[in-house]
Amino acid sequence: MIDRTSRDLAVGLLTSFLEGQIGFDELDVNWPISDDLALEAIGQELWNAFYSEFKSKFIGTGPSPSISEQELVNRAREFLRSDEEYQWSTDRNRGEEARRSNVNPNLWPFFSV
């Protein structure tokens, strides 16, 4: 199921995060809750990449985000702009799932395994 309204909200949050207007804490608190599996999986992946119990992470301030962090956010935004159904599993073993299927995990969330 694609929840266009929630996906659009998430894209706006990711854009604000990339532009340094909000920190990860604000993105996390405002992340839409939906039955759209893409939002659940992408939210979890972002939490794994950016959550810090010590401080709110901002992109655009402090140390520059790594290329892989920037690519993760940009891939997430592009997928959420699409009308594609999310086809990967929603558990934390996506990397292992991709390796077993010979799919490049850096293409997540675009290709199914």
Image: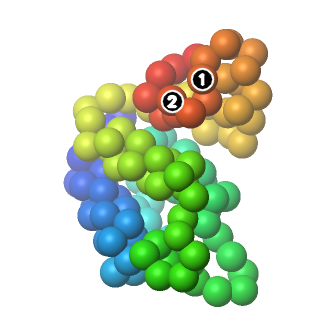
Label 1 sits on what residue type?
Asn
Mark 2 secondary-structure assignment? helix
Query: Quick check: can you spot residue 25?
Result: no
Q: Position of residue 56 (x, y in %)?
A: 58, 83
Label 2 sits on what residue type?
Leu
Mark 1 secondary-structure assignment? loop
Quadrant assignment for the N terminus:
top left
In-image side of 47 versus 108 (left or right): right
Q: Position of residue 51 (x, y in %)?
A: 64, 70
Are there few (<14), some (14-19), or many (20+) residues within 10 Å of tag 1? few
Name the residue beneath numbered marker 2. Answer: 107
Name the residue beneath numbered marker 1. Answer: 104
- Furthest-bottom residue in view? 55
Q: Residue at x 26, y 43 (%)?
A: 81
Query: Quick check: can you spot residue 41?
Result: yes
Are there few (<14), some (14-19), or many (20+) residues within 10 Å of tag 2? few
In the rendered structure, are the residues bearing label 2 and label 1 in contact, judged by CB atoms less than 8 Å apart?
yes
In this rendering, is residue 113 above or below 32?
A: above
Quadrant assignment for the C terminus:
top right
Q: Position of residue 49 (x, y in %)?
A: 63, 59
